[in-house]
């Protein structure tokens, strides 16, 4: 009877030792995963922390380009009007010659 109890205790001890070993390895793996997640979070923060300023700068540049585009459209319209006047003047000049 004592032998059975001792064997049972040894088997139980080995099983619990195996479980403890697995828990220790799992703890180590979880630590590695946590470190990676922290580094990913830091890298994401570094990238995204500058995002608002870059978005604002991009918006300002788009606004400036739209203003320049509007000015260029106005200048193109004026050049077309001048060319049309020149063509009209040429037609009138050719009629009288």
Image (tube, helix red, strand yellow):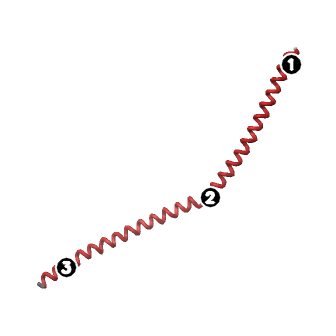
Q: Residue 5: percent from the left, percent from the top?
A: 16, 82
Label 3 neighbour load within 10 Å: few <14, some 14-19, many 20+? few
Q: Earlier in the sequence, mark 3 or mark 1?
A: 3
Q: Label 3: which residue?
A: 10
Q: Quadrant of residue 36?
A: bottom left
Q: Residue 31: percent from the left, percent from the top?
A: 41, 69
Q: Residue 77, which numbered label?
A: none
Q: Going by the image, does 68 lie left or right of 25?
A: right
For image coordinates 85% across by 19% down, the residue present is 92
Q: Label 1: which residue?
A: 93
Of residue 30 and residue 95, the one placed in the foreground of this image is 95
Q: Going by the image, does 57 lie left or right of 30?
A: right
Which of pointers 3 and 2 indicates the residue nearer the eye? 2
Secondary structure of residue under mark 3:
helix
Q: Earlier in the sequence, mark 2 or mark 1?
A: 2
- Looking at the rendering, in which quadrant would you find the C terminus? top right
The outermost residue toward the left is 1
For image coordinates 68% across by 49% down, the residue present is 61
Q: Label 2: which residue?
A: 52
Q: Going by the image, does 26 lie left or right of 34?
A: left
Q: Cα distance, mark 2 to mark 1?
A: 61 Å
Q: Residue 81: percent from the left, percent from the top?
A: 80, 30
Whether 68 is drawn above or below 23: the answer is above
């Amino acid at each position: 009877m004592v032998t059975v109890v001792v064997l049972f205790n040894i088997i139980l001890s080995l099983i619990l030792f195996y479980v403890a070993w697995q828990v220790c390895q799992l703890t180590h793996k979880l630590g590695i995963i946590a470190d990676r997640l922290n580094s990913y979070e830091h890298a994401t923060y570094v990238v995204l922390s500058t995002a608002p300023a870059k978005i604002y700068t991009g918006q300002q540049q788009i606004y400036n380009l739209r203003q320049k585009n509007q000015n260029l459209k106005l200048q193109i319209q004026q050049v077309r009007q001048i060319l049309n006047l020149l063509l009209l003047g040429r037609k009138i000049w050719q009629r009288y010659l």
